[in-house]
Image (cartoon, rainbow, N blue to C red):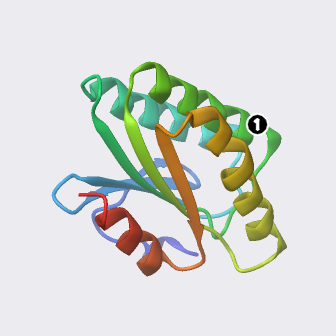
Amino acid sequence: MNTQDLQSSAIRISENATFEWIDDHRIVVFTTLQTPTRHDIDAWMKKVLEILNDLEEGGSYLALYDLRYSFLSPYARQQSQHLIELAKRKKVTGYFASVVGNNVFGQVMTFFVNFTLSRIGDKTSVGMCFTSREEALAWLREKF
């Protein structure tokens, strides 16, 4: 993906990652442009933490993570688990849709979301994987 593929409302938070708000600030969309570095993951983590900290206790967090051009590194997995635990402590209800590639890497990420993150969130955070952004957004929009 090149920078011309980015929507004009997307804000670059690092060399390989962007975020944007859609649907009247109800859904945040994070996109990785290629496999993220630690710096990219840290920038993503910082932005998610900022959003979670701005939520009131018991609030809702709806996010789409477009990871089609990424691979889930051990560091990214660790940071994802940390975010779920933070949301749980803050009693935030979270729904996150991950858009993954229709390949072996996408299958690995689907396994991680379905079997690892779902156990941490104790049903306060629900994640689903999709191979299309449109399907992911439709699922998230059902939540409001």
At 67% from the left and 38% from the top, the residue drawn is: 119
At 47% from the left and 19% from the top, the residue drawn is: 89
Asked whether residue 85 is in view, the answer is yes
In the picture, measured across the screen, residue 130 lies left or right of residue 60, that is: right
At 46% from the left and 37% from the top, the residue drawn is: 124
Residue 55 on image: x %, y %: 27, 29
Q: Nearer the viewer, residue 143 or 136?
A: 143
Q: Secondary structure at mark 1?
A: helix
Q: What residue is pinned by disc 1?
A: 75
Q: Residues within 10 Å of mark 1 (few under 14, many from 20)?
A: few
Say if 17 sits above or below 83 in the image.
below
On the rendered image, what quadrant is the C terminus found in?
bottom left
Give the quarter of the image for residue 48: top left
Amino acid type at image mark 1 = Tyr
Q: Residue furthest left?
A: 24
Residue 49 on image: x %, y %: 44, 29
Say if 74 sits above or below 49 in the image.
below
